[in-house]
Structure formats: structure tokens, C-alpha cells
Amino acid sequence: MNLPHIISVLIKAQNEFDSAAYARCFAENAQVFDEGRTHHGKAEIENWIHKANKEYQATMEPLDYDEKENILSAKTSGNFPGSPIVLKYHFQLAHGLIESLKISG
């Protein structure tokens, strides 16, 4: 699978529960949409992923990547009902960073 470098870095940070490294994958004014909430900017994204890592301890296993649409399908496993589940990660990338990420089931 040919993943953009920044998505590979994001997956590694997620699987190591490294909230700071995860947040560094995003542009300064990036947005993340997850579970009906929007998180704006690097600091808010880092706070969100830190809390999620503590609560869910979720890891990602890439299954497929649509290069045209920038959508990653990944088996996500952790401490949550229904684990593991395949989630879709919809990325908008620019200048080697993530500008937007929407996570859907």
C-alpha cells in the first residue's frame, strides 16, 4: 500500500499512543471530525487524541488506501464496544501535513 508519508507517521504515532507526535502531523489550523465533534488546531487535536488514547487505547492496521480520495480504511482495535471495527479516515493534505481528518464508520 502506497501511503503518503504523513499518514504513515500518523499511524505510527497512534499505535505508539504518542499524542504529541500525532498532533505534529497536522497543520496549525487543522480540524478533526470524530464522534460528532470537531477539534480545531494542533493543541485541541493533541488534547483530544491524548484523552482518546487513555480511554480507548486504539491501534490502527491499514487495510486499503484510496489515493484519489485520500481515504484510508483501517482495522481499529481497542477498549471500546464492537472492537475491532473498520473505520474510514478521510484526509485533506497540503504541504506535507494533514489539514482535515474526518473519521467515519
Image (spheres, rainbow, N blue to C red):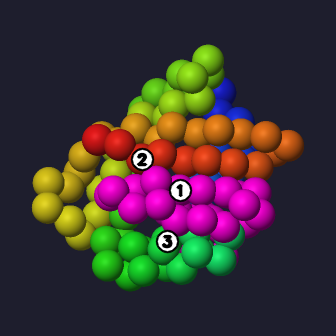
Q: Is mark 1 on a helix, strand or loop?
A: strand
Residue 32 painted magenta: yes
Disc 2: CA contacts within 10 A as few (<14), some (14-19) or many (>=20): some
- At 20% across and 55% down in the image, what residue appears? 83
Q: Name which of mark 1 and mark 3 comes first in the sequence.
A: 1
Disc 3 residue type? Answer: Ile
Residue under numbered circle 1: 32
Residue 6 x, y percent position in the rendering: 72, 47
Above or below, 72 against 45 in this view is above
Q: How far apart are marks 3 and 2 (CA)?
A: 13 Å
Q: Distance between the residues labelled 2 and 1?
A: 8 Å
Left or right side of 48 for 9: right
Q: Is residue 59 visible?
A: no
Disc 1 residue type? Answer: Val
Residue 30 painted magenta: yes
Q: Is mark 3 on a helix, strand or loop?
A: helix
Residue under numbered circle 2: 103
Disc 2 residue type? Answer: Ile
Q: In which quarter of the image is the C terminus?
A: top left
Kindly identify which numbered label has been placed on residue 49.
Answer: 3
Q: Name which of mark 3 and mark 2 comes first in the sequence.
A: 3
Viewer-side label of 1, 3: 1
Query: Seen from this angle, which residue lies furthest right?
Result: 95
| Front one among 79 and 44 | 44
Disc 3: CA contacts within 10 A as few (<14), some (14-19) or many (>=20): many
Res 56 → quadrant: bottom left
Above or below, 87 against 13 in this view is above
Q: Distance between the residues labelled 1 and 3?
A: 10 Å
Q: What element carries label 2?
A: strand
Magenta residues? Answer: 13-41
- At 59% across and 56% down in the image, what residue appears? 31
